[in-house]
Amino acid sequence: MKKQIIPGCVMLVLSLVIAIGSFTFLSPCVHEDGSVGACHWAGRALLGLGCLLAVLSVLALLSGRARFGIYLSSLAVCTVGILTPGTLISLCRMDSMRCRAVMQPAMIILFAAAGLAALCGALACGRKEKGRT
Amino acid sequence: MKNAPLPLKNLIRKPGRTTALVLLTAFLALAVFGGSVIILSLRTGLRSLEARLGADIILVPSEAQSKISFQNMFLQGTTGAFYMDAAVTDKAMGVPGVEKTAPQTFLASLKADCCSVKIQVIGIDPEKDFTVQPWIARSLTGELGDMDVVTGCRVEAGIGEIIRIYDQRCKVVARLEPTGTGLDTAVYCNMGTMNTLLAAAEAKGVSHKISSGDDSVVSAVYVKVKDGYDIDTVNSALTGKLRKVTAVRTRSMITGVSDSLAGISRTVTTMVIVIWALALIILMLAYILIVRERSREFAVLRLIGASGNMLGRMALTESAVCGLAGGLVGTGLAAIGVFSFSALIESSLGLPYLLPDPGTLLLLAAGTVILSAAVSALASAFAAWRLSRVNPGTALREGN
Amino acid sequence: MLLRADHISKTFFRSTGSANYFYAVSPLSMEIAPGTVTVLTGRSGSGKTTLLNMLSGILEPTEGKVWADDTDLYGLKDAALSRFRNDRIGVVSQARSAVDTLTVAENILLPAKLYGKTPPEEETRYWMKAFEIAPLADAMPKELSGGELRRMAIIRALVQDPDVLFADEPTGDLDDENTKKVLSALHAFAHERNRAVFIVTHENEAVKYADRLFRMEKGQIMQPESE
């Protein structure tokens, strides 16, 4: 049981960091003139994905039987999260820009870690299911 | 698992203790690998800067505040635009001891043109240039034609892509290899293209006019001094002959950079040493405590005929395995951090920063992992030695 | 294998009292022959365990020698002595003596595994069944009671098939039924396989199984009480 719950807790913490970070300490580039670039929308998408992942984590913690499926879908969300900055939504053209120097690597690492937790959770649930039959 | 050797069983079946030891060594590996990569990258960056600055002296308008804004532009990629009469190039050639001169013209793009940020556009004269041209030649086989641009490695634009600068369509024909300097965020074009861009900028209200009223302007002139001439003498001669022009010795720029680099290297090295000393002490204490906790277990092993050396070897194997695992974890984490955030590290250090080649990095990673295993084994050596001398008779009684 | 103690004694340092040293075991000589069960009784602190440790190659005597046939036990280097003990001497300690990271079965097979010998799995199963701890084969030592641990330690010594088996209070945590079982197993081991068994005990029951009985008082062996 513990092995199934801990990944959910880890995911919840990471998803909150993603969601809150997407408009605070991991935000995309801020332009003095108030204009917005593509990276701004990437940040919005990451906020959405972070919130979605947080909801999934809570569901994983609360639900019993559906946990395995929730972990698998979280894994899919994390994959999208990894691809969002830079691949699905383009960022600024220069490496030294904040969106590429800070937001992109941090978000990729956070989603990768959350994905790893989801994978561990799915494996733990799968193993238990196997043991039951 | 059933047939795993005893040391491995001991590690796996005491997960809490093993995790703590692995994390401790991971911390060591993280510090040493991260620290080393940063120091090495700074050194590689400095070498790259020296190679890129093929000139001995750089002439810039006095208004460029000589070193400050120029050096920032060079090192950090901040944009700068300052102009002087193009005739400076030829006048400098007239000074005794000057072998070659190469003019460059700078223009800062408008934000919206490219990527919502200003980028530095640098016009060069491919005929005369000896500073950037050799690097461009490595990436670009043909000529740098009109309205063609070569981008630094940190400007994200594919070859063949069109980028707009002051509404002029420029075609990206090549991308430069990384230099670790501010030049990585610049875009290069020939003087013809630069003149077109200057005119377009003028039309948009970005003036580059100089007081003399001459249309032909340059921003900096790179000077190569003939062999056998004293660079300082030539430097003073240039300053004397040219008005409103400051001559900057590239050496002094590099010295400035290498001074800061030495400072940062010292700080990082000190930090790594302090972390190691602390972690080593903690590790040694941990192993000593563990031996106390495990004295009964080792007495039992002695009782059934394990020799002192066998126990010592077992303890060393356990700690080496912990060290190896910790080394892998720590190096991996450090690699993720240092490589993912290299752009951030570069901009916060404000110094040339260029990751060493993959071979060096791999070697460094392997070295770190081996070092962690060795240090972990070393930390447990005293404990292992004490274990090898455990007397089963007395130890079992104490454990009662 | 004939085990012979030749004027062995053990003195320990003591910081209080008039003398700096005291004799835990006063100089004594004795033989432990194959095919016999030797039982040593005596009050607590009389030096029984110290004597057992010296005879079994664990504790070097202050003076005197222990001979195993023609081998001077304490003349051997640590590695050789350890190997010798693993091959030919079995010890059941008075204290709890399980390796906590190994299962019960792994603990029993550990002596063989240390030197890469073929593990005596058949015998292990037999004795675990006989001593009624067969279901605990995969349990960890911390899940076992004192009596179960004691039986595990005895099985570990038995399956080593040593020439001499030393047992320090082997029935300490056992009920009457198990005490009888263990003592008759040790007796059978000595007589059927022609091995030497040396038991240190408080247990009166053990006296019944003794071929030779010694009593120890203040570090000295009293004359054999029965032959």
Image: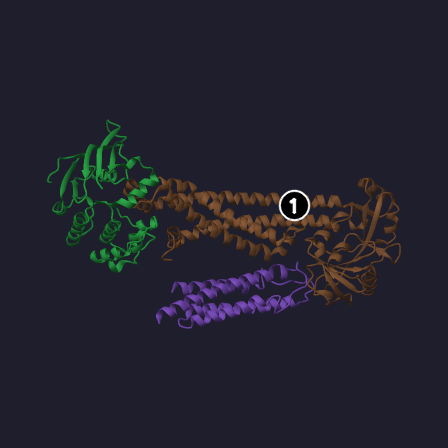
The residue tagged with tag 1: helix, strand or loop?
A: helix
Confirm whether residue C94 shows in the render: no
Q: Chain of mark 1?
A: B
Residue C226 point in image, percent of width and height: 10, 40
Q: Colour of chain B?
A: brown
Nearest the camera: B69 or B295? B295
Q: Quadrant of residue A123?
A: bottom left
Q: Which chain is purple?
A: A
Whether residue C175 sits left or right of residue B131 in the image: it is left
Q: Which residue is mark 1?
A: B261
Q: Amino acid at mark 1?
A: Leu
Looking at the rendering, in which quadrant would you find the C terminus of chain A? bottom left
Confirm whether residue C204 shows in the render: yes
- Residue at the left extreme, as displayed: C226
The residue sitting at 40% across, 72% down in the picture is A65
| Colour style of the rendered protein structure | by chain
The residue sitting at 78% across, 45% down in the picture is B56
Q: How many marks?
A: 1
Q: Which chain is green?
A: C
Residue A97, compared with residue C185, is above or below; it is below
Nearest the camera: B269 or B128? B128
Residue B209 point in image, percent of width and height: 85, 58
Whether residue A73 sits left or right of residue C216 in the image: it is right
Whether residue A105 sits left or right of residue A71 in the image: it is right
Nearest the camera: C190 or B18? C190
Question: How packed is label 1: few (under 14 Cα within 10 Å), some, or many (20 or more)?
Answer: many
Residue B50 point in image, percent of width and height: 72, 48
- Residue at the top extreme, as displayed: C18
Residue A5 point in image, percent of width and height: 42, 64
Looking at the rendering, in which quadrant would you find the N terminus of chain A? bottom left
